[in-house]
């Protein structure tokens, strides 16, 4: 092999090497971000409590809703509603129209005694003998994007919920 100035004659393209190096570093950053997102629960069900699970309460603390802020399209999620200091044996829970337009309810535990749908939203009426009750909604989002839902409890105080549904 020929030598020139005591070096091998190898074609070098420093501009190509620099571009390749930049693309490689950008790819590493993207892979790292995907790994962090997976660990935080953005690529599936679950996630770190406080980042994915949100708990909201009415001002009087009579209703507390725990729900997933980030959902996956067509993946089941859980919403837990805790009712406290109930004055009625037939408490109602109201959800605004986007709830039944964009979210499919798979199961409600315990089952509601009565369901009423109107232009504003959907109202579930439950039967309970205790002053405190926990209701679980198992849901699946039907659309990708942001979903804003208003929930109203037995005392007519409202809670705003925001879900973001990933594809």
Image (cartoon, helix red, strand yellow):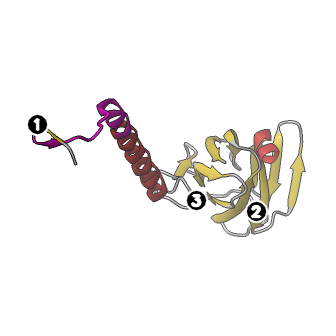
Per the rendering, the mark at residue 146 is none
Please give left or right for residue 159 compared with residue 94 in the image: left
Q: Quadrant of residue 90?
A: bottom right
Extreme front residue here?
Answer: 2
Q: Identify the residue at image location x=81%, y=49%.
A: 123
**Mark 3 to mark 1: distance in Å?**
59 Å
Q: Quadrant of residue 129?
A: bottom right
Per the rendering, the mark at residue 44 is 3
Q: Which residues are magenta?
A: 6-20
Q: Is residue 111 above or below residue 150?
A: below
Give how far across and how far down residue 118 sits, in percent.
89, 41
Q: Is residue 65 above or below residue 133?
A: above
First in residue order: circle 3 vs circle 2: 3
**Mark 2 to mark 1: distance in Å?**
95 Å
Q: Is residue 163 visible?
A: yes
Extreme left residue here?
Answer: 6
Q: Is residue 134 above or below residue 52?
A: below
Q: Identify the residue at image location x=29%, y=32%.
A: 14
Q: Quadrant of residue 59?
A: top right
Number of labelled discs?
Answer: 3
- Circle 3 sits in a helix, a strand or a loop, which is it? loop
Residue contact between numbered discs 3 and 2, judged by CB atoms under 8 Å: no
Q: Which residue is mark 2?
A: 89
Magenta stretch containing residue 11, yes or no? yes
Please give left or right for residue 165 compared with residue 121 in the image: left
Foreground disc of the pair 3, 2: 3
Per the rendering, the mark at residue 5 is 1
């Amino acid at each position: 092999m020929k030598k020139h100035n005591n070096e091998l004659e190898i074609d070098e393209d420093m501009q190509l090497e620099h571009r390749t190096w930049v693309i490689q570093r950008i790819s590493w950053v993207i892979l790292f971000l995907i790994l962090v997102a997976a660990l935080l629960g953005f690529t599936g069900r679950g996630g770190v409590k406080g980042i994915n699970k949100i708990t909201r309460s009415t001002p009087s603390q009579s209703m507390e809703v725990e729900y997933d802020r980030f959902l996956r399209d067509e993946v089941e999620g859980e919403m837990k509603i805790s009712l406290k200091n109930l004055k009625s044996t037939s408490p109602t829970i109201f959800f605004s129209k986007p709830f039944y337009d964009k979210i499919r309810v798979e199961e409600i535990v315990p089952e509601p005694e009565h369901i009423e749908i109107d232009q504003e939203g959907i109202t579930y009426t439950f039967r309970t003998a205790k002053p405190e009750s926990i209701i679980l909604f198992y849901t699946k989002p039907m659309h990708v994007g942001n979903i804003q839902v208003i929930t109203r409890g037995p005392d007519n105080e409202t809670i705003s919920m925001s879900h973001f549904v990933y594809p």
